[in-house]
Amino acid sequence: MRDAVPSGAADAPVHVLVVGSGAAGLTAALRATSCGARVTVLTKSALGHTATDRAQGGIAATTRDLPGGQSLDSSQLHARDTEAAGAGLCDAEVVRGVVADSPDAVTVLTEHGVRFDRVAGPDSPWVQGLEGAHSVPRILHAGGDATGHVMQSALTGAVRTAAARSDMSIREYTVVTRLELDRGVVRGVTVRPVAADGGLGPESVLAADHVVLATGGAGQLHPFTTNPAVATGDGIALALRAGAAVRDLEFLQFHPTALAAPGSFLISEAVRGEGAVLRNHRGERFMLQQHPLAELAPRDVVARAIAAERASAPEAEVFLDCTQLPVPDGTVRSEFLAHRFPTIDRALREHGIDWSREPVPVSPAAHYLMGGVATDGTGRTSVPGLWAAGECAATGLHGANRLASNSLLEAVVFGERIGRLVADAPADPTSWAGPALHPSLEDHDTRAMSQGPHSYAYASSSAATGPLPCASPAPAPTTPPGPRGQVRRTARGQAAAAAVPFTRTSRKATTRRDAQSPFTRAALQAVMWRGAGVVRTDAGLAEVERTLDGWLAAASSEGPRAEAETLSEHEDRNLLTVARELVRAARLRTESCGAHHRADGASSAGSSGHPDPRDPAAGTRQKPAPDTPGSRGDHDLHGGHGPRDFQNTQDLYDIQERTAHAAPLSR
């Protein structure tokens, strides 16, 4: 990587470069523009082709003080639910600040044109749903189960309008291949245009005072994922190569309920919030024995339970049963499901499933990466001039396991904060001091340090820096990893293999041992699913690590080669970089915690079985802290209806029954 932006080689300077076009990136771009900054949005695909666009569940927000809001909720309760789901690893200060800013996030979205669903008409209360590990219904929806699409459309429209007024610039089909540094400060990026056939054009350099990474997650590490094809860990890989700290990469959330069929897609947690139940192949409602909240337990608990049931017998399946789902009086169940969940209903019927009459086969799928580029409460990374927001960032909000529907909230809150700050920051930026780092194991070139008893931060020098070999076999598992740093080119234009269809046959296929197979996208996904999936062991992780190191060693043995020539090659490089660091992080964490489950390890404090969100002692181990920078603070932390108000599980379900099934939606 070059250390400086070469003089005369850069395009006209742009004050702020936003890399990514989901909710976090576009919110940051719009706010920075409104505050007077010059902004360019860079996206490797079409504007709005993002994970945000796929989000079904909604946005969690404390709306008690907003017209039409939820009077049963409070900032204290939302914060405590977040911390309980995070298994003790949430940053209390960040949680308090984000929850306090949630009403403002809702207001910002409405100002950009998002219309949240209401019970009857424009002046009626919002419909607020209940999802897993939430103590009260607080999830706002737009378009039923199309909240993300509605948000993405509104933000994309606002950005295109700003660009039409020449207030900002948009560069679609432009991939960022490198962060440019000058004496340790990010001063711009190297970009390449993406052709219609996926080929990459010549490099150019864009100078900037600030770069905001908002590139989403890395769901394409696994063959079964709810993420779009563009979720290839790009921002995390860029940050690693620039020397930025990352943390908590071992915490990858697997959504419990994706359709277990070819063409898999997410079936929102909100369906269970409406009363759907999970049954095993014997028809038993098995979640009643797994957690006090049953189907509404934290996602990692439900995902592991489903995985265990599917593995309990040959051809065993798990089903989401909506056939007895309660509906408002006078409403036909099929009509209610079609109206409440139009996207899911349409997709299931395309698969020949009438979910009002028959159960739906489901399986876990890679969904959300809690870890990422380490930031402070404002979105600053450990590298001056570099910011991160959304799924590619590890802000401390989610801890070891994200609370349902907190991701869209985090994206908007941090997008707003970063947008304001980069517009006001000086041209010579300063950075967050970052998490402390020190050398870990002697033979590793990763540096890691425990941030308290349960959280790790890393910096890495092992990032893959070129195209990957598609024909060279990885060495046998006994071969020590060779030098890393360069990788060689694949055949020009070769596309990554498609993910294996989500069927029983493919599930068996991914269990074969293929440590000596050549690198392909499908091979990487199969290795990660087998050894770094829902349930992990040190032996399985070690095998994955040897395979990844083997691919890197085989590539480096060829010597330095040119950059990737296709977008697919570039994405494969990024996926391998992130996979290597994720597996290292998973091996360092020998105990089970949140979404990271070690079958061969003990449960960490605060994660075994997950604290009940109604328990006043549940949640983060950290002490209350002052207001998060960029937040208005939380002055309601000790008021309202806190967890102590719920005396037993039935109380919680009574509230669900009274409030979750509102009148037909008005959009």
Image: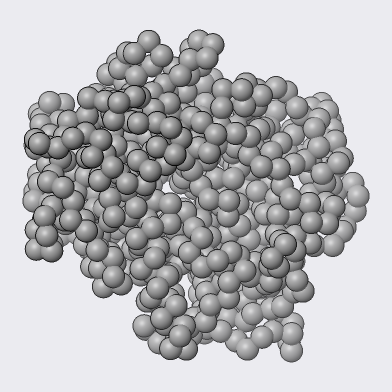
- Residue 4 vs residue 122: left or right? right
Name the foreground residue: 273 vs 589: 273
210 up-or-down from 539: above or below: below
Residue 370 at x, y = what percent? 46, 46
336 up-or-down from 13: above or below: above
- The part of the image, by quadrant, that contains residue 317 is top left
**Residue drawn at the location 39% of the way across and 51% of the way down:** 55
425 up-or-down from 610: above or below: below
- Tell me which colouring the rendered structure shows: one colour
**Residue drawn at the location 71% of the way across and 36% of the way down:** 523
Name the foreground residue: 425 vs 286: 286
Residue 285 at x, y = what percent? 30, 17
Name the foreground residue: 647 vs 302: 302
Task: Please say whether residue 219 is visible from this viewpoint.
Answer: yes
Q: Quadrant of the N terminus?
A: bottom right
Task: Please say whether residue 586 is visible from this viewpoint.
Answer: no
**Residue drawn at the location 12% of the way across and 34% of the way down:** 657
- Residue 492 vs residue 192: left or right? right
Q: Quadrant of the C terminus?
A: bottom left
**Residue drawn at the location 70% of the way across and 28% of the way down:** 543
Name the foreground residue: 322 vs 572: 322
- The part of the image, by quadrant, that contains residue 541 is top right
Residue 184 at x, y = what percent? 64, 71
Residue 421 at x, y = what percent? 40, 76
